[in-house]
Image: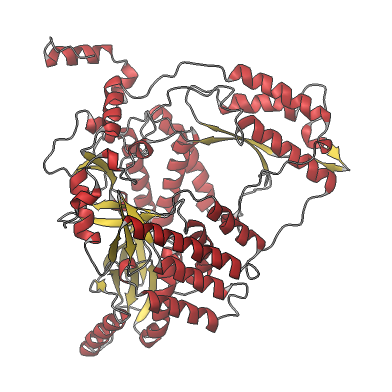
Amino acid sequence: MASPHLSIRHDATTHLGNMCTFDYWNRPANQAFHNLTTALTPPPNLRSLLGSGLKFIPTPLKPNTFNSVNKPNTGVPLLARSLRLRCFFCATGSPEPDAEHIPKLHVPSDWEPPPQFFPKIFNQRIANFEIKMHSLFRQRKAVPNLSKAHRHSLNRLRLQQEFIIAHCDKNLGPAIIERAHCIQLAFDDHLSDASACQQLSCTETEEHAEANRLRLHHWLKNHKEELASQEHDFVSHHFTNVTDPLPCFYLLMKVHKSPLKTRPIVSFSGSLFHSLGVWVDAHLQAVAKSFPSHIESSFDLLHDLNTLNLPPGCRLFTSDAKSMHANIDTDAAITSIRDCIMANQAKFPLLPVTPLIEALRLIMRHNVFQFGDTAWKQLSGTAMGAPPAPAYANASFATHEDAFLPAYSNHLACYKRHKDDVFGIWIPDSDSQIDATQWLAFQHDLNNWHGLRWVTNPPSNQVVFLDAILQLEDTHISSRLYAKPLNLHLCLPAQSAHPPGVLHGLIAGHICRSFSLCSDPNAALTSIQNIHRFLRARGNSSNTLRPIFNKCLEKSSRIYAPGPALDTSDIHPRMWFFKLVYHPQDPPSGLIRKTWEETIASPRLSKPLEDIDLNFTPIGKRQFIVCYKRAPNLDNLLSYHKLQPTSGPPVLSFIDD
């Protein structure tokens, strides 16, 4: 600790002298955040705390004990239940797979098989496994990955009332802003628009919430016969377990805009219409993806571009919608989606049209959300934050594209759209006047849909689209990765208490992305060198990174090299899962796996688990996976999504009488 009685130089010398060599050479060099404060001074030690990134995980105060891995639906109980279920289905026969099963709508079951189907030999093996786990997961003292000063700063941030820690739009890192300033921005940018939002009193809020409950109840009752049993059970299960019916409003900071702007987000998670929105999204995605203009990502775009033979003289252009979700006409959008489905029923034979359209109307016309101690009803535009919002926006505008794009088939070598971003290749007319007229007509038709406006850049040889820079070279298009200038590149810090496979996955994913989006191998290698540099600047040592990069590069060379497909015959489709929250001081996953092998899978002088059969059906070979769940990160600990009245000035105080 620093001494107030000594000079700063003396304290610094003492601190450096007590620091071990490894920590000195592997300290994060890149620690930054966006300071959006205008009047108040942020707390001290904030740069090195928030500079770790909101995904940084402080080490939990206590490592896992046997009680931690013996809780229901985790660790030992979950593994034992998986064994009991496997034995039951081996003895009675596995159920036929449901062809209409939708994984997104799965409701976990707590059903337990009858005990007579579970051989006694397994009870002994599980008991031996529990004994070993009890000795492995004994009480230990946790080693923190934050200094005492940082822990105090984190606690102060969680208790203080003056500041808010916010996310920046476009994944540009964390930001700190005064609470009052953030609330004022919400009103100035969004909530003060009387045509878009209406404030509700407490009585009105309760009335709307109850009315929405009745609407959802009637929807479930009226369409029970049209829904599959899984779909009805999913919506009904979450409907009966809702505790807080209203979604929460919060902001993302657009630090790349000057002056500062915000993006409104409404988190539907856990709210009344959340399960209904997930059901709508599961069906509406098929409609949105059926249009030729649809792309999921820049990977899809480059795949399509590689198949094109471009005529000479082409130009690239991009277009960006102005607040697309907020400016979509609800009635027009729902009508266009309904008409599209009815006209193409052969494409969507299993789509429940009537329940789908009614559910869309429920979500889009009755969105009531909370912001601090206030409640609001959205009057126009797409229900912000609703699960089907992206698919709804994509499908509705795609019906307009289908109507006007064929008129420009001679001028468009390519037209693709990802949500509110359009990429196109324009083939100019030999007559410059005709070409200018056609270009203006194209922009007019693009904007001719119920007031939605698009900002279209003039055709050029190079454009930035999503996360790629696309360059026109003769008759083909080259590409390389793009990052916004304000991106802080806050990669995973070395000190973060992440599960061990996360760093490997991050590096493997970036290498895959580099080789997929960079047409020039040298540009891909430059991108890979950059991520290595960013990780080093975040405190990861070369000794840690080098073997991971070498392994991932070797694997990527096999994936992207021409030749036969990789052999996946040794990949087991089913697995045994041992689930627990990750802690760095816990026994390593290899030791847990070894214990599984010695006590359950292949104990000495006993028959291996995979060879044991019940009713002439063997248990079968399955891979044992230690499945880690991460501990709360800084984002979870500092989240402001719910502005509680006790955490500062109430939102209601910012509303003019």
Q: Residue at x 73, y 37 (%)?
A: 83
Q: Residue 30, position in %: x, y? A: 26, 35
The colour scheme used to paint the residues is: secondary structure
Q: Residue 150, position in %: x, y? A: 28, 25
- 416, 567: nearer the viewer: 416
Counting labels gives 0
Q: Is residue 258 left or right of residue 321?
A: left
- 497, 657: nearer the viewer: 657
Query: From what the image shows, is residue 604 above or below residue 508?
Result: above
Query: From what the image shows, is residue 598 above or below residue 322?
Result: above
Quadrant in which residue 332 is drawn: bottom left
Quadrant in which residue 103 is drawn: bottom right
Residue at the front extreme of this rendering: 203
Quadrant the C terminus occupies: bottom left
Residue 586 shows in this picture: yes
Residue 304 shows in this picture: no
Q: Residue at x 46, y 51 (%)?
A: 270
Quadrant in which residue 334 is drawn: bottom left
Q: Residue 198, position in %: x, y? A: 28, 64
- 556, 36: nearer the viewer: 36
Query: From what the image shows, is residue 160 above or below residue 109?
Result: above
Q: Residue at x 34, y 53 (%)?
A: 370
Residue at the top extreme of this rendering: 5
Q: Is residue 49 left or right of residue 40?
A: right
Q: Residue 1, position in %: x, y? A: 24, 14
Q: Is residue 367 left or right of residue 175?
A: right
